[in-house]
Image (cartoon, helix red, strand yellow):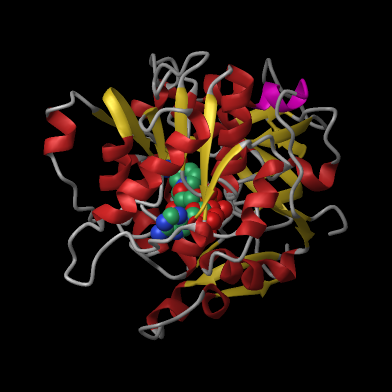
């Protein structure tokens, strides 16, 4: 079959400054291994781009083959994932073409695939994301969605929302599910009506769903974006309170000597005040990491909470601990979501409470170029991949 792959041998020749385009290539001679009892073979009809394929393709902070080794160490029955190629892609939808007898799914069923791979023995845990066996499909496991067919665990399957056409149905689950757990779940912020939440990167893949989930919950989202095109884009998803970096007087998170730019912090606080009448928020939706974490903590009211799932600008963050303990604040770590949360989140799309309108629909061949654009912060919302013609 045809697939977009990262070849092990290509990573050996990588230069100091490389881009996703250099490590991803198309192959049309991939033969997938047999599926196990707890797996399904899915003909992929559509997929979605996520930042994690940027990380895979630049082998940073961890080389994808090291991640595959890690998965197999934790899941010795999954040795078939160790190949000389890696197929990325952590969002997808399609038709089941092979599955052993199962009470929930059968061959021919139309499904969306969520990316939480968890050993069957741990699926009954209160929160299966706490299982040591957990990996992200198409990032830490092989046979992701950038291919004609994919091998997935049956526990990753969700019925495809009937209201979504094939070409966009495989591109919402990862960021929607992540944002849902971060904001709405008891495993995340567990936000309630009238709470206020500051959202970084509001025009991005996580951001557009964070805005909509907040609005659905009756929470007030205060959005941050880097420019006015992104500001306009957020409005299409229901954002009302938006701060654009391009309109600020101070534009740097840090001073030249590496200290926090507290003038920038004050300006953001003042902007929040002018939008919602108070200069502190109940919660912050964090993912940029090193650039923003200290400021996120500062922006919280006493007892407020930051939830974080990523570190796009760097994972070694400097913070001022005084703002944390003196004001009794908390930082919560979050990672994708469990199957229950994924089903609830997908249902929000199926019932029309959350809209999924990708900014672009591309083909398999266009993925490397578009990942480059994601890497350079040039994209808006989600990008869908149409594989229906393959
Ligand atoms: P995305 O679509 O590229 O959006 C990220 C947004 O973050 C961009 O639109 C950009 O907005 C903003 N941003 C980037 N660097 C920033 C900085 N230094 N300061 C402030 N804002 C910054 O990516 P995404 O899908 O939303 O994912 C964001 C991150 O979360 C990635 O690192 C991804 O790997 C991670 N993630 C983790 C999980 C998980 O389960 N742990 C799940 C999904 C995503 P502006 O240009 O407007 O500033």
- Foreground residue among 130 and 153: 130
- Foreground residue among 10 and 377: 377
In the shown orientation, is residue 354 left or right of residue 10? Answer: right
Residue 79, given in percent of the width and then of the height, sits at: 42, 50
What residue do we see at 68% from left, 34% from top? Answer: 238
Dominant SS type (magenta): helix
In the shown orientation, is residue 315 left or right of residue 372? Answer: left
How many numbered discs? 0
In the shown orientation, is residue 52 left or right of residue 287? Answer: right
What residue do we see at 60% from left, 69% from top? Answer: 373
Q: Name the image quarter holding residue 256.
A: bottom left
- Highlighted magenta segment, given as a residue range: 346-352
Residue 312, given in percent of the width and then of the height, sits at: 40, 56
Residue 54, given in percent of the width and then of the height, sits at: 50, 63
Q: Is residue 308 visible?
A: yes
Q: Is residue 53 visible?
A: no
Q: Name the image quarter holding residue 316.
A: bottom left
What residue do we see at 84% from left, 59% from top? Answer: 390
**What is the quadrant of the N terminus in the image?**
bottom right
Query: Is 169 situated above or below 339?
Result: below
In the shown orientation, is residue 84 left or right of residue 38? Answer: left
- Foreground residue among 135 and 75: 135
What residue do we see at 69% from left, 51% from top? Answer: 232
Q: Any magenta on residue 386?
A: no
- Foreground residue among 311 and 340: 311
Residue 90, given in percent of the width and then of the height, sits at: 57, 48
């Amino acid at each position: 079959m045809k697939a977009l792959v990262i070849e092990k041998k290509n990573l050996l020749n990588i230069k100091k400054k490389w881009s996703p385009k250099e490590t991803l290539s198309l192959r049309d001679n991939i033969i997938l291994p047999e599926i196990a009892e707890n797996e399904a073979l899915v003909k992929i009809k559509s997929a979605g781009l996520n930042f994690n394929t940027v990380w895979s393709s630049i082998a940073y902070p961890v080389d994808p083959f090291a991640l595959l080794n890690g998965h197999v160490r934790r899941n010795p029955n999954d040795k078939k994932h160790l190949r000389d190629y890696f197929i990325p892609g952590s969002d997808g939808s399609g038709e089941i073409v092979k599955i052993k007898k199962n009470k929930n799914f059968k061959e021919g069923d139309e499904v969306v695939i969520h990316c939480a791979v968890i050993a069957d023995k741990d699926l009954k845990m209160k929160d299966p994301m706490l299982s040591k066996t957990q990996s992200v499909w198409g990032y830490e496991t092989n046979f992701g969605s950038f291919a004609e067919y994919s091998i997935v665990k049956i526990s990753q399957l969700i019925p495809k929302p009937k209201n979504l056409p094939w070409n966009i149905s495989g591109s919402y689950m990862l960021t929607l599910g992540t944002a849902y757990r971060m904001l709405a779940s008891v495993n995340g912020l567990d936000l309630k009506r009238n709470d206020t939440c500051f959202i970084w990167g509001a025009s991005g893949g996580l951001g557009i769903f964070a805005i909509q989930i907040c609005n659905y919950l009756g929470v007030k989202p205060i959005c941050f974006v880097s420019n006015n095109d992104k500001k306009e884009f957020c409005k299409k998803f229901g954002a009302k309170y938006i701060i654009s970096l391009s309109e600020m007087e101070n534009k740097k998170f840090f001073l030249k000597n590496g200290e926090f730019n507290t003038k920038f912090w004050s300006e953001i606080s003042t902007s929040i005040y002018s939008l919602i009448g108070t200069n502190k928020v109940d919660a912050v939706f964090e993912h940029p990491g090193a650039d923003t974490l200290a400021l996120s903590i500062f922006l919280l009211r006493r007892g407020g909470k930051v939830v974080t799932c990523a570190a796009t600008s760097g994972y070694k963050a400097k913070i001022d601990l005084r703002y944390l303990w003196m004001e009794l604040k908390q930082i919560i770590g979050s990672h994708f979501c469990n199957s229950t949360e994924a089903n609830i989140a997908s249902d929000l799309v199926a019932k029309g409470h959350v809209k999924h309108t990708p900014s672009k629909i591309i083909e398999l061949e266009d993925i490397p170029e578009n990942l480059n654009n994601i890497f350079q912060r040039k994209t808006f919302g989600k990008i869908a991949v149409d594989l229906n013609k393959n």
